[in-house]
Structure formats: structure tokens, C-alpha cells
Image (spheres, coloured by chain):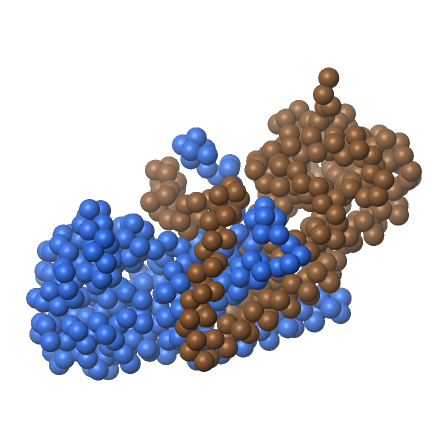
Chain colours: A brown, B blue
């Protein structure tokens, strides 16, 4: 008999985009006997029950975690250490604790020391999301075709890791196992620095004396609007990511700035050849991402009218 | 009787994404008695005829332009001066010459001096596009709901401008009239700098020793993939844009780098308050763009599975 991806009691701490989506995915796949959720806001807990991605709302972290077989921490990473301290006394022997944070070395540093012997700590990170947040944002299909990275720590139990992999796969994800430092460096380039430059660009456009915000809005289809989507992501979550992946972010940002300066210099000195070469190379990367199923092949992400279905056109 | 948006003979020079889309839009709206197209490549001309966005393929610029009532220059802006010189002897009195270039001061500089008296020169720029290029990329709905900017020059004929506005509106666009310098500054922020930073970021990701391209591709859904779309745009077109909007691009790039340094410093010094404030502000801009109809309100540009129609799901 193969190993089951199913846990008897699953506790989800933090009921936002990821917590909600995990609850829905676990229920869709019958991956949990019982899903209990906790969020510090009562309104959020009520909304979780109402939308049905949790079976029960706990009024405290300890109540949620008690007897749980799988505990998934879905809060911004800045909150994890306090959570780990709070739940430590009630963790059941043999339980698995995981998280969904976008940084991993800091999570190992903050949570690891508070995990008792006999409890499995397996940090994780689903590379999936939207610009929305809160208990209304989640949906069962969020992880479909996306990668979830697990970064087991020294001495992680092999069976516990394997079971968590099966759980994620049953949620629709592909699973990769990486070393924490490599995770943080890789995500700095595929996620953290892209978000930082998007936030920066959108912030600059809000502050100009010579161009009005009305004109920025009107002419956003020239490329700017693409950046505004990721710059609309949850501010608390992103603050915590940058504060907790400082070295890798600053390293990758250094590369970015160096390269940007090279292109600025090419513009200043009319070096069309350099510009053309750089701009040609980047097309290949887009093609790879589409070939790997990590983005839509439809032009403009499919948002042009001719790609809309008749139903979607009627909604316009 | 109101003014008609219709021109008897329309010549489209350059049969790529914009030229093709204009041909289709003109035919859909019956905005042209006859559409003649020219492209330097014979294969492109043949494809234009085959797809049907032109009625006739001319074998030279002069043949296309002769007797035309509206000439729309749809090549990269670096090619415009030579085109203007070539067509000058055959332009018909009373004809309108326009273009679709993403920069306008350089077009006025390069094309303006070669327009004979009695011919109306009205530079234009549809703020619309996709990352695709070539004669297969165009479609009639490209301009739907997007803005086209006209930058009439000193002494432009009012009726000629009005007629061109009606033509663009009949293609589905909204029309704004701006001064050339203001256009170039505005587009530097809503289009040119966003493209430059996207090209830069994608270029950096291609060149790392510590992170493989395979991992960049796998984990692109963390935000990076959004940048790869605009970094897949036509290299010749973008080289010409930067070479021809140097001052505004460098000015706006200076602001961007200054702000990026401020955020880098906030990360280095654990200044979470600054990060949180900047990241909160940028959400409002996204909302404005959606409220103005310049982007889809669907999370993730609508590319998540639950937003796909059953037909699109079947295609997967």
C-alpha cells in the first residue's frame, strides 16, 4: 500500500490567500479528516467558515494546533517566531509543522529552535499567488501546475517529507526539494527583486511633478500596468520578505543595478547594437517559461478582447 | 452632415502588429475605400494579403503612397526619415501623413522637414500592443478601449486632425491630443522605463552563476514571468524608442534608480516602516487603472485556472 497524502486533522494558521486556497484544495482532494483554521481577526475566521475552506474556527493558536497532524503556518513570515513559541507546548508527537513563507533561511532560524523533538519541521513555499489577499482571495486551483519548494532541515524524517510532498501534489502542485540558501537566492531573482522593482516603478509614477496621475492611468497599457499588478500585493507580507531575505535581495539587486547602468550608458551613447543584443536575448526566456507551462502563451496574458470568450465579452 | 472617418485610399507602410491591426480595424469599420500595404519583405506583403488586412500589396513605398488620402507609417521609428524622403515626391496635396511611433519629438524632427506644403502631417501613437510582432500578430480589436495620442504640429489643419481622430475612434480607440514633449515624458514613465527595467531584470536572470536557468523558469510564477512578457517585445522597435527618447528616458530612469536606492537602504537598515508605507501606496494606483478600464480586474490578469472558461480548460 502506498503512502496516503491524507492527514487526520489539519490546522491552518492564517486564513488569507494561501491559507484559504490550501483549505479549499485539501477539501477538494479529501486530504484532511478535519480542517481547523485560526486567524487573529474574528471576522476573518467567520469568513473562512462561511466560504467553507475550514470546518472549524479555533479561537486561539493552541486550540487550533492541539491534536493536529499537520500544521500549516500561512501568516506573513514576521509573525512565525511568536507563533512557534505559542504552539510549542501543545504540538503532538509525530505531527508535521510546515509553512508557506517566501523566504526559508529566516523561517528555519525563527521557527526551528521552538520545534520539540518528535515533531517534524519541514519548511515549504508554494510559488503561486495573485495580487489579492485576505479570506476572500483563496481558491482550490491556485497551486495547479505551480511548484512548491520544500526545504527539509538537517535530520528531517524521510517519511514525513514524503507524505507532505504527496499532500502538495494532491493539491495540484509539483514539488521540488532545495537547500534553504539556494531557495532564498533563487527566489530573490524570480520573485523578490521583481516585486521590489515593480513597487519602485509604480511609486515613482505616483510622485512626478511633470506627469499627472490621470495621464499615468490613461496610458498605462504601454507596459506600466503589468508592473502595477505585482505592486498591488500584500504590503505586510512583502515587508517581511525583504527584511528576512536581505542578503540575497541586496546581492541580486546589485546585479540588476549594474546591468541597468550598462543599458542607460548604451542609451546615452547611442549604442544601438548593445540594446538590440540585450533585447533579443530576453525573448528566449519568455519562450522557455511558456514551454514549461509556467505562463499562458496567449499574447498580453490573454487579456485582449479577441481572446475573451463570448461570456466574458458580455460582462465587459 | 458630420465629418466622415472614412478615407478613400489608405496606405499602410510596415505590416507588423500595428499595421496589421489597423488594416483589420479599417476594414471592419469600412473606414477605407481601398487599403494598400507595403513592407520591405515580400513574404510579409504576401502574408498581409493572405490574412486580408490589406487589399493590395505595393512593391515600393512610392507605389503605395501615390494617390493615398491617408498614409500611416507603422515601421520602427528609426526607419521613418528614409521613408519620408522616399515618399515626398509622390504625396498628394490634401493627404494626411501620420505614424504610430512610441516617441514623438524624434518623429517630428525626422519626418516633419520632408512633408511638402499642402500635406497634413499629424504624428500619432496608439498606446496598445502585445509582445508579438510581424504580419501574423495583428487583430482588429487591438485598439478597443485603449488611448491613441495625436501630437499635431504647429499649423496642423484642424479638419485634418478631426478626421484622423474620427478614424481612430472608429477603430475603437479613445483619442487624446498632447504636445510632443509631454507625450515623450509621459510615455517614458508609462512605457519606456518599464520596458527597460523588464529587459534588464530578465537579462540579469539569464546570466547568474548561482541560479540555473532551469530554476528561473520553474519558479517564474513568483512575479518574474510578468516581466518576461514585456521583455519579449520587438527588439528593433525598442532599440529605436530608447535611441529616440534619450532625455526623457534618462530623466525618469534617474528617478527610478534614486527610489530603488532608498528602498535598498530601507532593507539594509531593517526599516520596515518605510517599506510598508511604499508598498501600501502602490495598491491605489492599480485600482485607478482598473477603474479606468485600462486593465482587467481579474486576479493574475485572469490567467488562473478558475478564471478560464471550460473551452480554455479543454485546450490545456
* Residue at the (16%, 70%) spot, across then down: B96
- B148 above or below B246? above
Q: Is residue B262 visible?
A: yes
* Residue at the (11%, 72%) spot, across then down: B91
Q: Position of residue A209 (x, y in %)?
A: 49, 78
Taking the image as shown, residue A76 lies to the left or right of residue A295, namely right
Foreground pick, B205 / A30: B205
Count the labels in the image: 0
Taking the image as shown, residue A130 lies to the left or right of residue A212, namely right
- A17 above or below A212? above
- B191 above or below A124? below
Q: Position of residue B125 (x, y in %)?
A: 31, 66
Q: Position of residue B116 (x, y in %)?
A: 14, 80
* Residue at the (10%, 60%) spot, across then down: B8
Taking the image as shown, residue A256 lies to the left or right of residue A100, namely left
Residue B150: which quarter of the image? bottom left
Q: Which quadrant of the rendered structure holds the N terminus of chain B? A: bottom left
Q: Position of residue B77 (x, y in %)?
A: 31, 70
Q: Is residue A13 visible?
A: no
- In this view, the residue farthest toward the top is A1
* Residue at the (29%, 75%) spot, across then down: B107
Amino acid at each position: 500500500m502506498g503512502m496516503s497524502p491524507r492527514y487526520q486533522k489539519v490546522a491552518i494558521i492564517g486564513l488569507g490567500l494561501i491559507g484559504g486556497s490550501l483549505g479549499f484544495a485539501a477539501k477538494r482532494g479529501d486530504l484532511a479528516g478535519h480542517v481547523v483554521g485560526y486567524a487573529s481577526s474574528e471576522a476573518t475566521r467567520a469568513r473562512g467558515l462561511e466560504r467553507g475552506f475550514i470546518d472549524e474556527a479555533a479561537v486561539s493558536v493552541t486550540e487550533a494546533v492541539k491534536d493536529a497532524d499537520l500544521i500549516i503556518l500561512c501568516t506573513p513570515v514576521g509573525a512565525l517566531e511568536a507563533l512557534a513559541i505559542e504552539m510549542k507546548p501543545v504540538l503532538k508527537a509525530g505531527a508535521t509543522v510546515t509553512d508557506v513563507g517566501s523566504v526559508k533561511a529566516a523561517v528555519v532560524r525563527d521557527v526551528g529552535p521552538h520545534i520539540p523533538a518528535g515533531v517534524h519541521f519541514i519548511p515549504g513555499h508554494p510559488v503561486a499567488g495573485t495580487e489579492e489577499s485576505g479570506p476572500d482571495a483563496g481558491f482550490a486551483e491556485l497551486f495547479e501546475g505551480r511548484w512548491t519548494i520544500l526545504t527539509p532541515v538537517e535530520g528531517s524524517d524521510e517519511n514525513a517529507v514524503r507524505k507532505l510532498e504527496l499532500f502538495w501534489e494532491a493539491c495540484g502542485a509539483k514539488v521540488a526539494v532545495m537547500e534553504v540558501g539556494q531557495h532564498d537566492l533563487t527566489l530573490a531573482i524570480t520573485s523578490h527583486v521583481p516585486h521590489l522593482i515593480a513597487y519602485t516603478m509604480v511609486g515613482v509614477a505616483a510622485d512626478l511633478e511633470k506627469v499627472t496621475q490621470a495621464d499615468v492611468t490613461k496610458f498605462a497599457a504601454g507596459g506600466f500596468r503589468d508592473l502595477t499588478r505585482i505592486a498591488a500585493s500584500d504590503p505586510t507580507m512583502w515587508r517581511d520578505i525583504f527584511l528576512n531575505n536581505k542578503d540575497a535581495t541586496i546581492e541580486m539587486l546589485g546585479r540588476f543595478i549594474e546591468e541597468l547602468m550598462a543599458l542607460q550608458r548604451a542609451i546615452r551613447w547611442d549604442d544601438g547594437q548593445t540594446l538590440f543584443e540585450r533585447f533579443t536575448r530576453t525573448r528566449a526566456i519568455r519562450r522557455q517559461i511558456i514551454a514549461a507551462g509556467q505562463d499562458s502563451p496567449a499574447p498580453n496574458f490573454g487579456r485582449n478582447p479577441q481572446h475573451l470568450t463570448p461570456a466574458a465579452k458580455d460582462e465587459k
